[in-house]
Image (spheres, grey):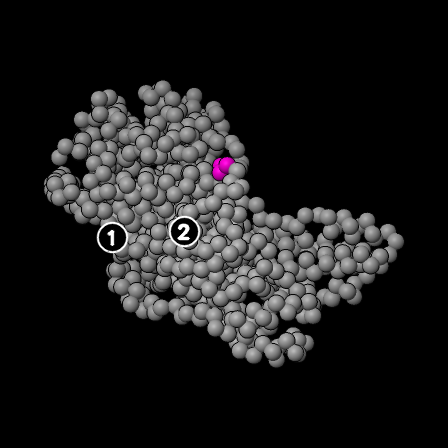
């Protein structure tokens, strides 16, 4: 087959076709290192098949919606998910498919292989895409190998790779991908070696785990670590793993994490003498290539195999590096399970307990000294919970995408977001509140005439978020709210469609021994979907309690009812800015020129909720504007917060500046079956109140009528 190049046939002439990973291994093999049997599928295969299938135009269309520097990371994740599904469903030419399957069947027979990315710039001296493109272990059948080749192709467009390409100034449309198909060596121990240790420049560093390397790479298995002095190859220090309970082994579905046999738990993966030999090999590679090396290895009996070798590129020192931040948000299955337990058992109960305790304190009955202390105490509580939200809740939000990637991998649906319908049975607090408000709407006059009785109504607990956040006193609720309640009588109360058939098809896609995993995965996905909304409500409840004591302090200062000596203290507390979660976010860098006086005909965003709707725009830039919302209007805003969703049942469609299929606004829109377009730059300023819009949630387009 013209696209397949044997490792021994790799040369300077075809280096650009096989990628740096393959080139490095070919050179190591020529130097005498033991390298697993492998063959490369050239970049031309990727380029020709993407063009023949029309995927090149699909990708171009996706990334021509708006400038790359204006694309949020959540939008990139969504695009990546769509790309993966598109690659899995892409129509290969018959000639390519037949010749590839025939070659792989004959070449590897029944041997398991690793299907690894090998992009031209990957593992090069000028850049390192380490971990940004996908690789897959223990793939056996020719058809599965072909499927994983297409997944590796799709990883050229992963969010991490795109962020990195943007960072180092590469044009993603000029990129291509070669694939290394490499025999799997099932070693007794595996690891990495750095010819120059990141911790000590006079040492090499060796890390090792029992079994396969994957557990160490994804962080689920802690390695033993050696610092080896470069000059005499003696052990300078040895740090055993804190716990040796798990290891990664081959499995019918690829690899799996399982319990480490008891006899291995008290022994290091390799002896000191073996660690020194591994360090010696890393230093030998440094001499051979003329630059420090990062080497991935496995040891089978007495043989040391080199799986990958790349130059050690300069580490980015900027702690605000967005690519590092967002790559840390992605979580594997085991980490998601841990996050879920922490959130459900500790974080949310602690937030709710703190809110309820604060709620019992009447700020009006505190003297000035106690009020000052209470403001400071509540501020500290909010900061503590915001950190917990950032450390646990935000990463757990990736659970929806993690589920979606596996769902699409298994079922290859035509709609890459079909999986969302399987997550929807988990009802969110804001939807429960909306339902309660609709119950109230059936008799709003009773509520309006006897507001104090509402305080003791069982419905208040579910609806309290709306009121606590915006009205500290039931008497402050404006008449416009009661008018809104009347409009809610006929609001959209669409039920989520049944997902039973989807659930049956989902479980059918898993083998018998995978059913427990499938059940737990679905549970995590549904919890992630629900908590994507609920955790904001819990956190905002704590913030609102801080707002109440600040409001009381303001009131006393305005009425000049503050004791001597406390005026400055209360003013200082009031003037401190409210704590905010500051996450790096790729948003528009004001790349759009001055548009005053410009009349738009069409705006382009990301499709986030199916359907088409037309209506007048209602731009929401502050809470009070919600009460004037009319049935059938298009809700336009910067971003939908949980406190805004009680008007969503009245809306005909939603347009949002913030982008992403799985952000709060998009989730709520789908719950009510509304067309939704997100990721529209400056949506709330480009669209004016009263503009007649058509919202196309299939294509992600807003048209001015």
Q: Is residue 596 left or right of residue 568?
A: left
Principal secondary structure, stretch drawn in magenta: loop
Against 487, is 150 above or below? above
Q: Nearer the viewer, residue 13 or 344?
A: 13
Where residue 368 is drawn, which disc sits there?
A: none
In the rendered image, residue 542, in percent from the top left (x then y), is placed at: 63, 59
Name which of mark 2 and mark 1 comes first in the sequence. Answer: 1
Where residue 252 is drawn, which disc sits there?
A: 1
Asked whether residue 51 is drawn in magenta, I would say no
Q: Is residue 629 left or right of residue 260?
A: right
Highlighted magenta segment, given as a residue range = 589-593
Q: How many marks?
A: 2
Against 78, is 547 above or below? below
Give me the C-alpha separation between circle 2 and circle 1.
Answer: 50 Å
In the rendered image, residue 563, in percent from the top left (x then y), is placed at: 86, 56
Q: Residue at x 53, y 47 (%)?
A: 685
Q: Which residue is mark 2?
A: 703
Q: Residue at x 36, y 59 (%)?
A: 611
Q: Quadrant of residue 507?
A: bottom left
Q: Nearer the viewer, residue 313 or 448?
A: 448
Asked whether residue 592 is drawn in magenta, I would say yes
In the rendered image, residue 357, in percent from the top left (x then y), is placed at: 67, 65
Label 1 element class:
loop
Label 2 element class:
strand
């Amino acid at each position: 087959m013209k696209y397949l190049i044997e490792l021994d046939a790799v040369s300077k002439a075809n280096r650009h076709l096989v990628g740096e990973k393959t080139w490095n291994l070919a050179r190591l093999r020529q130097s005498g290192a033991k390298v697993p049997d492998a063959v490369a599928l050239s970049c031309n295969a990727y380029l020709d098949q993407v063009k023949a299938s029309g995927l090149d135009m699909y990708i171009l269309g996706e990334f021509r919606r708006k400038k790359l520097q204006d694309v949020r990371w959540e939008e990139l994740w969504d695009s990546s998910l769509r790309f993966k599904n598109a690659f899995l469903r892409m129509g290969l030419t018959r000639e390519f498919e037949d010749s590839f399957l025939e070659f792989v069947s004959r070449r590897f027979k029944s041997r398991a292989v690793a299907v690894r990315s090998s992009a031209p710039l990957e593992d090069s001296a000028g850049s390192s895409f380490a971990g940004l493109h996908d690789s897959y272990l223990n793939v056996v059948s020719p058809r599965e190998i072909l499927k994983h080749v297409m997944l590796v192709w799709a990883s050229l467009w992963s969010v991490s790779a795109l962020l990195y390409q943007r960072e180092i100034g590469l044009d993603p449309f000029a990129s291509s991908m070669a694939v290394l198909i490499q025999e799997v060596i099932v070693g007794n121990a595996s690891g990495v070696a750095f010819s120059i240790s990141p911790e000590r420049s006079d040492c090499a560093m060796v890390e090792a785990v029992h079994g396969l390397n994957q557990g160490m790479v994804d962080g689920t298995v802690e390695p033993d670590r050696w610092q080896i002095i470069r000059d005499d190859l003696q052990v300078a220090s040895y740090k055993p793993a804190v716990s040796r309970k798990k290891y990664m082994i081959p499995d019918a579905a690829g690899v799996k994490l399982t319990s480490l046999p008891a006899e291995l738990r008290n022994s290091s993966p390799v002896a000191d003498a073996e660690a020194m030999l591994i360090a010696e090999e890393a230093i030998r590679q440094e001499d051979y290539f003329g630059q420090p090396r990062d080497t991935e290895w496995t040891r089978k009996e007495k043989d040391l195999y080199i799986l990958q070798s790349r130059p050690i590129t300069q580490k980015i020192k900027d702690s605000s590096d967005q690519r590092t931040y967002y790559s840390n948000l992605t979580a594997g299955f085991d980490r998601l399970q841990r996050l879920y337990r922490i959130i459900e058992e500790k974080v949310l109960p602690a937030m709710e307990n703190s809110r309820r305790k604060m709620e019992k304190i009447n700020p009006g009955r505190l003297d000035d000294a106690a009020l000052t202390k209470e403001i400071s105490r509540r501020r500290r509580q909010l900061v503590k919970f915001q950190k917990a939200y950032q450390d646990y809740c935000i990463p757990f939000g990736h659970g929806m995408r993690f589920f979606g990637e596996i769902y699409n991998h298994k079922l290859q649906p035509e709609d890459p977001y079909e999986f969302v319908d399987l997550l929807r049975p988990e009802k969110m607090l804001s939807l429960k509140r909306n339902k309660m408000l609709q119950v109230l709407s059936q008799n709003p006059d009773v509520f309006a005439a006897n507001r104090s009785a509402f305080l003791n109504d069982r419905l208040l607990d579910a609806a309290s978020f709306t009121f606590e956040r915006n009205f500290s006193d039931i008497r402050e609720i404006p008449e416009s709210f009661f008018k809104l309640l009347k409009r809610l009588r006929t609001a959209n109360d669409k039920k989520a469609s049944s997902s039973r058939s989807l659930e049956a098809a989902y479980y059918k896609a898993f083998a018998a021994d995978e059913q427990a995993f499938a059940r737990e995965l679905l549970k995590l996905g549904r919890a992630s979907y629900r908590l994507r909304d609920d955790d904001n409500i819990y956190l905002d409840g704590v913030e609102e309690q801080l707002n109440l004591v600040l409001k009381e302090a303001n009131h006393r200062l305005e009425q000049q009812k503050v004791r001597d000596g406390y005026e400055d203290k209360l003013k200082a507390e009031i003037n401190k800015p409210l704590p905010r979660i500051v996450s790096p976010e790729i948003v528009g860098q004001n790349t759009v020129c001055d548009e005053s006086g410009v009349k738009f005909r069409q705006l382009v965003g990301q499709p986030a909720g199916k359907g088409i709707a037309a209506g007048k725009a209602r731009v929401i830039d502050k809470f009070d504007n919600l009460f004037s919302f009319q049935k059938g209007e298009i809700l336009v805003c910067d971003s939908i917060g949980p406190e805004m969703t009680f008007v969503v049942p009245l809306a005909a469609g939603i347009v949002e500046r913030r982008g992403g299929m799985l952000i709060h606004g998009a989730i709520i829109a789908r719950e009510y079956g509304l067309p939704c377009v997100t990721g529209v730059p400056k949506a709330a300023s480009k669209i004016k109140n009263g503009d007649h819009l058509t919202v196309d949630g299939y294509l992600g387009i807003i048209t001015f009528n």
